[in-house]
Amino acid sequence: MRTLRLCIEAVGRFVFPDECPACRAPLQAATFCDACAAALVRAPLSAAPPLLNTVRAAFVYDGPLRSAVVRLKYAPDPYPARALGTLLAQAFPDQASIAWCDTLVPMPLSWRRQRERGFNQAALLARPLQQQLGLQWAPHLLRRRHRPAQAGLTAAERHKNVADSFRARPCHGAAVLLLDDVVTTGSTLHAATNALLSAGARRVLPLTLALALEPAR
Ligand SMILES: [Zn+2]
């Protein structure tokens, strides 16, 4: 009985998170605790990373948001994804700026990284927004080759590293919302956008949970 009860508690904890994804305080809301929610900073609309003309980002990559994303990316624990995905969906309630999109593509991982991590954090983040907007779910439209890790590279080195990383399946006329967790220089989103446009997409809007105003540490 005890094992069964622990199993039920574990499942319930995943479906209904009960701790803040940043500070792990007891959670009464669907996203962050009150103190962490008050410390979130909305991304300025005019701030675009160097390689992208346009990107929509919800928050500045700092403070509690950064803690939760790091926890999501580097621990074998997809638990913060539900809170972060809900937060992302709440950040775009008007839908006006993204209403022309009809297809949602989460930024893919290479097969090797997906196997190592066991999940794609961008896909987990994207689900609440995809369901809220009623977009076609297209996680396999874009494929990514394995490349060395980006951390520690300059912007020019990142650009070179990812420029030829992506291939897209034919998607003639699609209006794609391309979703990633964090944008830094924009090199990854730039390369993925080009691949989708080359495969026939009509328009691509990169959208991220967070915008790093300095290179990610
Ligand atoms: Zn908190």
Image (spheres, grey):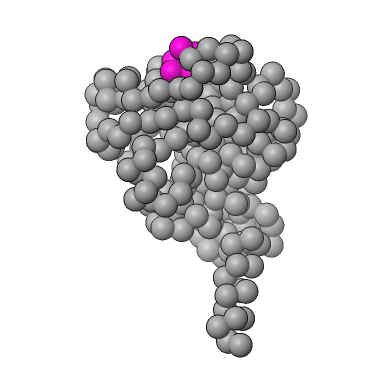
The x and y percentages for residue 183 are: 44, 30
Can residue 19 be found in the magenta stretch? Answer: no
Horizontal side of 161 relative to 201 (left or right) equals: left
Query: Residue 33 appears in which quarter of the rendering?
Result: bottom right
The extreme bottom residue here reads 1
Secondary structure mostly seen in magenta is helix
The x and y percentages for residue 154 are: 25, 26
Query: Residue 45 appears in which quarter of the rendering?
Result: top right
Q: Is residue 93 above or below residue 158?
A: below
Residue at image point 60% right, 51% down: 83
Along the line of sight, the residue nearer the viewer: 178 or 95? 178
The x and y percentages for residue 59 are: 55, 36
Residue at image point 55% right, 18% down: 171
Horizontal side of 20 relative to 120 (left or right) equals: right
Q: Is residue 63 among the parts visible in the rendering?
A: no
Q: Is residue 150 above or below residue 66?
A: above
Q: Is residue 142 among the parts visible in the rendering?
A: yes
Q: Is residue 29 above or below residue 104?
A: below
Along the line of sight, the residue nearer the viewer: 158 or 210? 158
Residue at image point 72% right, 38% down: 132
The x and y percentages for residue 162 are: 32, 25
Can residue 195 be found in the magenta stretch? Answer: yes
The extreme front residue here reads 170
Quadrant for the C terminus, please.
top left
Quadrant for the N terminus, please.
bottom right
Which range is magenta? 194-198
